[in-house]
Amino acid sequence: MAKVKIATDWLDVCSGCHMSLLDIDERIVALAKLVEFTSSPVTDLKHPPEDGVTVGILTGAVSNNHQEETAKEMRERCKILISLGDCAVFGGICAMRNLFDTEEVLRRGYVETESTAPGQEIPRSEEIGKLFDRVKAVNEVVKVDVHIPGCPPPADAIWFALTELLAGRIPVLTGDNLTYE
Amino acid sequence: MASVNITIDDKKIVAQTGQTIYEAATAVGIDIPHLCHHPALPPEGACRMCLVEVEKQRVLQPACTFPVTEGMVVHTESPKVVEARKFVLQLLFSERNHFCMYCQMSGDCELQDLAYRYNLDHWIYNRPYPDFPVDSSREYFVMDHNRCILCRRCIRACADLVGNYTLGLKNRGAATMITADNDVPFGDSTCISCGTCLSVCPTGALMDRKSAYLGREVEVEHIKSTCTACSVGCGLDLITKDNHVLRIEADWDAKPNRGLLCEKGRFEPLWDSRKRAILPMIKRNGKWRKADWEEALDLMALKLGETKGAVAGLASGQATNESLALLAKMLREGLDSRHLAMLSGSLAEPSEDCDLTELDLVDFFVVVGADLTENHQVVGFTVKRKTTKRTARLALISEGENGLAAYAMREWGPDEVDKAIEMAVSAENPAVIYGMEASKETLRQLHEALDGKAPFVGLTPAANARGAAAAGFNGSLNGSAKGLYILACEEKEIPSDVLARAKAADFVAVQASYLEPWADIADVILPSPVSFEKQGTIINNEGRTLKITAAVKTSLKSEGEVLENLIQRLGL
């Protein structure tokens, strides 16, 4: 049987969810026998293959236009999209800034932080992603098939979800596998 | 009450008329999820989490408010019910800031528990992120409106348990908010900081400042003890972790407070900012220096021995029966002292044995010479609760300002006690509650008219006043005392008569938890554990013996150990 192709990417994120994926430890060897990891933020291939993958995994919230494009590209190129982690599923820590005005947040981050030297300005280059006024969860931007919340999700929950998918079932998280913290 | 036969989840149950479905189900161990409901509060039916399917009813019904009837068939976890609950959870989570990962209640939150129970793995609605403020104007705890689910438990706790009616709602629909009085910051409101709302909040909307983020339910220990802030003797549930008391909560099962506490019991002990006495201190030529225990105890034995026969002993009402017995032994047998008194004074006459929970049945309170909004607040809560619900009336006999005045039908001076008596005798279940300012004469008049009809509940400020009296600390202070031994515990003030006597004495020894306010008058201060560090018993004003349990370990010598050391040195 051909290996199942998986692509992953991160959006507005601390990268902890990808760490949790690695936390499945030696089970990753068993997983590698069954699946092929294609693109990911830490491999040379940054975009999911154009001919598509079976499973796409997104971590992080959608905070700017670049991330929205990334999410849409992943959605187009995968059959099953997994939202991994609280930020992807709910908006999470990133959505804290929704309680404030975006300009206020930028000013705080780039100008007013105690460690910032005086005279700094908010970067406005066209090349950087433009912050949305409101951080969104992935399912507010594209359709999501499987949600694995957690900050980060337990490695066991990720392992459970992937093995369920490999067995042809849509995973339903319960017990310790379901956590928001 | 008549029995009714009902069926809940295929289980045949005999319930009582007047019970709700929730009560009938809970009685046989069927768990119906709920958020706005709380066993100590009247049902509200606000959150819709307890919806159940009742056969022959057109729509789902809230179990917490729906009364049982003969032949009723209820399904508590049918697919229709589960779907409705998930829907309710989706709405609750989508509305405000219910991100668990940075909430201090995560792990102990009733909303989160239900989301886990119903496998809520994502939210289906877009979030409005409404702009709600965080109100941190109160000293001990913070209200984050963004985490509020409008269950109204806090409002009911404030009104129906405490009788304070500070909290209410403002605005409508999604903009609804908990508010205080006529929409003022909580810190500027009529809030009395009893913390009852904090203790019933199901989410992280109300957050205790001291214990926030310091430990979750699974990481902490609960230790039952007794409050020593006054003589009501409220049951405490001390929350500890790593040998620290994180938070003081009320014991919901304890008489007489049944889950209630006041500011003095719930917050003040942990917020005391006075400097603790850690090592024995000796004053020489007006200067304090640290000393070791041997030196301090030797000096005390020597100095007190020199004043033998002219020593007076003063005890705080926070001292345990066990310490008081040792102190009495030391004073009487070791120092020939006949002057044993209480630091905080005593009532004109001791309270009779009573059961404070029976005040719930009273329909006419005569409160004499006591401000129950200052001291003994938990008894005051009963008076406030009952007078505002109009199940009791209050006649207040006092001089000067009294916090209960607004709750009283009439306020009379001590010379008009006959008018209160006239009304009390015609009541069915009157009760007399008296404090330090009640004179012997006033009490005599009340006894004459109401003995046998009304219980006489005397409230002393000192927690263990009855234990102290039993140990012999019921005399008055002798003006000619040359030596003074004060077992001060955590007392905050020196009564003026004690101050004068102490200044006149040759030698003043103090056993205290805090250096303040004793440093001015003492010659030696011996450190002493605070209430949650010590073990023993007290007798509250009901006459019940209650246990004080050490919730944390301390390296300080206990009150008793110090006294035993002194007794030994005095050659007993």
Image (cartoon, coloured by chain):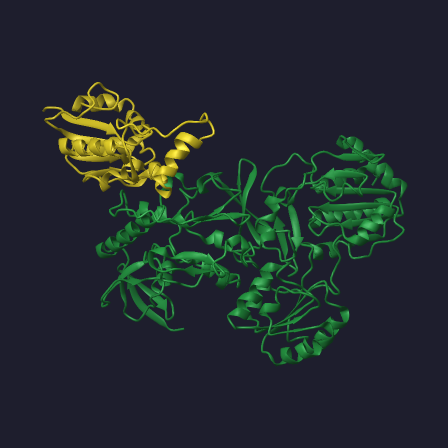
Chain colours: A yellow, B green
Q: Locate residue B79 relative to residue B507 in the image: left or right.
A: left
Residue at (34% x, 41% y) in the render: A98
Single out the residue that lies furthest toward the top. A44
Foreground of the two, A133 or B320: A133
Residue B202 place in picture, x, y as percent: 41, 51
The quarter holding residue B61 reads bottom left
Whether residue A74 can be seen here: yes
Q: Locate residue B127 relative to residue B440 in the image: left or right.
A: left
B195 in relation to B409, above or below: above
Residue at (86% x, 37% y) in the render: B302
Foreground of the two, B169 or B51: B169
Residue B489 place in picture, x, y as percent: 70, 46
Residue at (28% x, 22% y) in the render: A26
The C terminus of chain B sits in image quarter: top right
Single out the residue that lies furthest toward the front. A119
The quarter holding residue B54 reads bottom left
Foreground of the two, A35 or B9: A35
The quarter holding residue B431 reads bottom right
